[in-house]
C-alpha cells in the first residue's frame, strides 16, 4: 500500500498510536478522552439503567403470557401446515380421479396414443406434488409418465435423458405371441420424441404392492412410505382402481424431498423444527432428510428410514407419546439444557392407512411476535427509568456522530477523487477520531498532488502498484492499441457541435469501459482517437491476449452503439484499430510539476501505423506479427501483406484479427491460430 504516508506512519497506526505534530500544538487543542473510554461510559450507563429497571419488573406474568400466546400460535400454524400437506395428497388424488375417467385408460388403449400422453403430461404439470402418473392392468400392460425436473439432476443423469427432456414415457405391452416389450420415450416440453429405446419388459405391475393391495378390502388410497429404488428418494404412491372397462389401477408417486423443502419454509424461528412421522415411529419427511437416511447393513439392501428416537430427543418423543395416548395436541416440554419448547401435532387425514402425522415445534423464547405488545409495555416502563440520562446520551452521541459523519464525507470525497477543494481537517475531542482526521488530511493532500498529472484511474493503479512518482521510465513489454473513427471530420463537420461532443463522449466512454474491463489503461484521448496500453502500470503476464479480447469486444460494442446512433438519427462511427506488442519505455514524461504517464518508442509508432493501414486494405483490425506469435492458438488471424511503414527500415508482416479461434474456421483466405 502506498497512500503517500511514510511507512513508519502505518506501522505506528497498527500499534494503536500516532505521533503528534508538535507538543505546543497539542497543548492548545481541546482536551480529549479515549474513544474506548467514551464507549465504555455510554455502554455501562445504558446497560445499568436498563438492567436496574428490568429488576423491578415481574417476569412471571410475561412468561405466562408467552406460554399462552405461543401455544395458541403454534396450534394455528400446525393446523395450516397440516392442511397444506393434506392438500398435497388431495391434489394427487384429484389427478387420479381425472385420469381413471379417461376412455383410453378404461379401455387400456396405450400404444401410439398421443392424446392420452398429452392428457397425462397436462395432469403432471397441473398437480405439483406428483412426480409421475402411471396405469397398470391385469393383463400386464403398463404406462408411466415422469416429470423429470421434479426428480432432481441425479435422477435425470441416471436415466440418460437428453438435455431438453421434460418427460419420460414408459409403455409396456404384450404382443400377440405373448412377448412383453417395453418402450421408453424421452419427450420434450411439446411432447416431441428426443430419444427412444425398446427392449424386453423387466417390470410387471401386477407383482408390485401398489397394484396388488389396491384390490384388498382394507386398501387405503395412499401406500406406506417407502424408498424408491431407482433414485433413493422417499415417497408415497397414491392409487385408485380403474372404475370400468379393463381391470387396472391408476397411481402416482409423491417424492417427499419436495415436501422436505416445503417443511423448511414452514419452520418457526431459528431453532424450530417441522417434520412428518408415521405410526411405526419412522421419520418420513424432515428438512435435513438427506443426512438422516440410514445406509443398508448389507450390500443390495434398501436404505432404511430413520426412527423418531434416532432423530429427535427423548423429550420430543415423550411429548408425542402423551399426544397419541389422548393428550392435548399442544405440548410444552423442556429440552436438556433448560430450553422450553412448545409443540403441536396433527394427523394427516388424507394419508389413510399410511398413518402420517405432523409435528411442529419451536423454542418459547423465539415467539417474540406474539408477545411483542406486552414487551412493548415493559419497555416503556424501562425507558422511564433512563429518561433522566437521555439528554446526556443524546448530546454525546450527537458530538460523536457529527465528527464521524464529517470524516466519512471527507474520505468519500477523496475516494471519488473530488479534489477541487483541499481536504478539511475534522477536529474532535475523541483522540482516535482526531488522529484519524490528521491521516485523512495527509492522504487527501498526497492524492490531490498526485492527481494533477495522471488520470484518476491511472492514479489508482499507480497507488496500488506502488510505482515511483518521479520523472523517468523503464523498458518493458507492453501491448499498445490505437483507434480512430473513419472519416470523422466528414461525419461531423456540418453537425451541431454540442451533439458531436455528446455522441463522441458516449462513444469514447463505451470503448474506455471495455478496455478497462479487459485490464487495459487508457493512456490518452486525441480528438476521436484512443490510445490504450496493457501491462503497465499493472503487471499482466497475459497482456497480449487481454488486448486482443478487448479489441474484439470494442468492435462489438461499437456495432451495438452504432445501431443505437442510427435509431437516434446520428451517423454511425466506424472504428479502425491498430494493435502491436513490443518493448517500449514506460514512465513519467514531462516536468516536475506536470507529468504524463505514457509509453514511448518504435512500438508505439508501429501501433499507430497499423491503425492507419486499415484505410489502405479496407480492414477494421490490423495487428503485427508479434501479436500473432504471442497468442498463437487463441485467436484467428488473416495474413494481409508485408509492408514497410513510414519511418521503419524493415518490412512488417501485417495480419487482420478475425476473432477467437474456436469461433472461426478456414472458409476463405488464410486463418492463423
Image (spheres, rainbow, N blue to C red):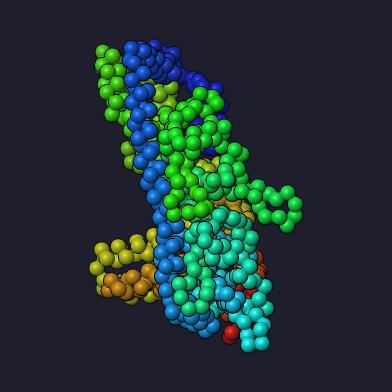
The quadrant of the rendering that contains the C terminus is bottom right
Residue 218 percent location from the top left of the image? 52, 58
Residue 573 percent location from the top left of the image? 38, 72
Residue at coordinates 44% horizontally, 18% vertically from top-left? 36
Please, which residue is most extreme toward the front here?
217
Residue at coordinates 51% horizontally, 78% vertically from top-left? 246
Please, which residue is most extreme toward the bottom here?
176
Dividing the picture into quadrants, the one containing residue 126 is bottom left
Viewer-proximal residue among 535 and 192: 192
Dividing the picture into quadrants, the one containing residue 541 is bottom right
Location of residue 122 with respect to 668 vertically, above or below: above
Is residue 267 shown left or right of residue 394? right
Dividing the picture into quadrants, the one containing residue 637 is bottom right
Residue at coordinates 59% horizontally, 77% vertically from top-left? 139
Viewer-proximal residue among 60 and 637: 60
Location of residue 315 with respect to 350 vertically, above or below: above
Residue 532 percent location from the top left of the image? 49, 59
The number of numbered discs placed on residues in the rendered structure image is 0
Residue 29 percent location from the top left of the image? 36, 15
Please, which residue is most extreme toward the right here?
298
Amino acid at each position: 500500500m502506498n497512500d503517500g504516508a511514510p511507512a513508519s506512519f502505518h506501522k505506528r497506526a497498527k500499534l494503536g498510536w500516532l505521533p503528534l505534530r508538535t507538543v505546543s500544538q497539542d497543548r492548545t487543542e481541546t482536551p480529549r478522552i479515549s474513544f474506548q473510554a467514551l464507549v465504555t461510559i455510554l455502554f455501562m450507563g445504558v446497560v445499568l439503567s436498563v438492567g436496574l429497571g428490568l429488576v423491578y419488573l415481574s417476569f412471571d406474568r410475561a412468561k405466562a403470557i408467552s406460554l399462552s400466546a405461543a401455544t395458541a400460535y403454534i396450534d394455528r400454524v400446525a393446523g395450516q401446515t397440516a392442511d397444506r400437506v393434506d392438500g398435497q395428497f388431495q391434489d394427487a388424488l384429484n389427478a387420479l380421479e381425472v385420469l381413471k375417467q379417461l376412455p383410453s385408460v378404461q379401455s387400456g388403449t396405450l400404444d401410439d396414443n398421443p392424446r392420452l400422453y398429452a392428457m397425462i403430461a397436462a395432469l403432471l404439470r397441473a398437480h405439483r406434488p406428483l412426480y409421475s402418473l402411471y396405469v397398470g392392468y391385469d393383463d400386464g400392460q403398463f404406462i408411466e409418465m415422469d416429470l423429470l425436473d421434479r426428480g432432481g439432476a441425479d435422477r435425470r443423469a441416471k436415466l440418460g435423458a437428453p438435455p431438453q427432456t421434460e418427460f419420460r414415457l414408459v409403455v409396456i405391452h404384450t404382443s400377440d405371441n405373448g412377448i412383453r416389450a417395453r418402450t421408453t420415450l424421452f419427450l420434450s416440453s411439446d411432447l416431441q420424441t428426443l430419444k427412444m429405446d425398446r427392449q424386453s419388459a423387466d417390470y410387471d405391475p401386477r407383482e408390485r404392492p401398489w397394484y396388488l393391495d389396491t384390490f384388498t378390502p382394507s386398501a387405503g388410497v395412499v401406500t406406506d412410505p417407502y424408498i424408491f429404488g431407482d433414485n433413493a428418494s422417499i415417497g408415497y404412491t397414491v392409487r385408485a382402481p380403474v372404475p370400468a372397462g379393463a381391470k387396472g389401477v391408476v397411481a402416482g408417486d409423491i417424492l417427499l424431498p419436495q415436501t422436505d423443502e416445503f417443511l423448511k419454509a414452514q419452520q418457526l424461528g431459528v431453532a424450530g423444527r417441522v417434520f412428518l412421522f408415521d405410526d411405526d415411529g419412522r421419520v418420513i419427511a424432515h428438512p435435513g432428510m438427506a443426512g438422516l437416511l440410514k445406509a443398508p447393513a448389507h450390500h443390495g439392501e434398501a436404505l432404511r428410514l430413520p426412527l423418531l428416537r434416532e432423530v429427535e430427543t427423548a423429550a420430543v418423543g415423550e411429548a408425542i407419546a402423551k399426544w397419541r395416548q389422548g393428550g392435548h395436541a399442544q405440548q410444552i416440554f423442556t429440552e436438556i439444557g433448560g430450553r422450553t419448547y412448545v409443540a403441536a401435532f396433527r394427523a394427516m387425514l388424507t394419508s389413510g392407512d399410511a398413518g402420517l402425522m405432523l409435528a411442529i415445534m419451536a423454542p418459547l423464547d423465539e415467539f417474540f411476535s406474539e408477545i411483542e405488545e406486552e414487551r412493548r409495555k415493559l419497555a416503556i416502563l424501562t425507558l422511564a427509568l433512563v429518561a433522566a440520562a437521555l439528554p446526556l446520551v443524546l448530546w454525546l452521541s450527537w458530538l460523536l456522530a457529527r465528527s464521524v459523519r464529517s470524516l466519512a464525507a471527507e474520505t468519500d470525497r477523496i475516494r471519488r477523487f473530488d479534489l477541487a477543494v483541499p481536504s478539511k481537517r475534522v477536529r474532535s475531542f475523541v483522540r482516535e477520531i482526531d488522529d484519524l482526521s490528521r491521516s485523512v488530511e495527509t492522504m487527501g493532500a498526497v492524492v490531490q498532488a498526485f492527481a494533477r498529472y495522471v488520470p484518476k484511474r491511472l492514479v489508482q493503479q499507480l497507488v496500488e502498484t506502488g510505482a515511483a512518482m518521479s520523472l523517468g521510465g523503464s523498458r518493458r513489454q507492453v501491448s499498445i492499441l490505437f483507434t480512430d473513427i473513419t472519416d470523422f471530420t466528414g461525419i461531423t463537420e456540418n453537425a451541431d457541435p454540442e451533439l458531436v461532443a455528446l455522441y463522441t463522449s458516449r462513444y469514447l466512454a463505451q470503448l474506455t469501459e471495455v478496455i478497462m474491463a479487459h485490464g487495459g489503461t487508457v493512456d490518452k484521448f486525441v480528438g476521436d482517437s484512443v490510445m490504450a496500453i496493457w501491462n503497465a502500470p499493472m503487471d499482466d503476464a497475459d497482456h497480449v491476449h487481454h488486448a486482443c479480447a478487448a479489441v474484439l469486444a470494442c468492435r462489438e460494442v461499437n456495432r451495438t452503439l452504432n445501431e443505437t446512433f442510427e435509431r437516434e438519427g446520428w451517423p454511425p462511427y466506424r472504428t479502425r484499430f491498430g494493435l502491436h506488442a513490443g518493448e517500449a519505455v514506460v514512465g513519467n514524461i514531462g516536468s516536475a510539476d506536470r507529468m504524463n504517464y505514457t509509453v514511448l518508442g518504435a512500438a508505439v509508432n508501429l501501433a499507430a501505423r497499423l491503425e492507419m493501414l486499415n484505410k489502405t486494405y479496407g480492414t477494421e483490425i490490423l495487428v503485427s506479427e508479434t501479436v500473432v506469435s504471442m497468442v498463437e492458438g487463441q485467436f484467428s488471424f488473416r495474413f494481409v501483406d508485408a509492408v514497410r511503414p513510414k519511418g521503419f527500415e524493415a518490412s512488417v508482416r501485417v495480419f487482420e484479427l478475425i476473432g477467437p479461434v474456436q469461433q472461426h474456421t478456414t472458409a476463405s483466405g488464410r486463418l492463423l491460430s
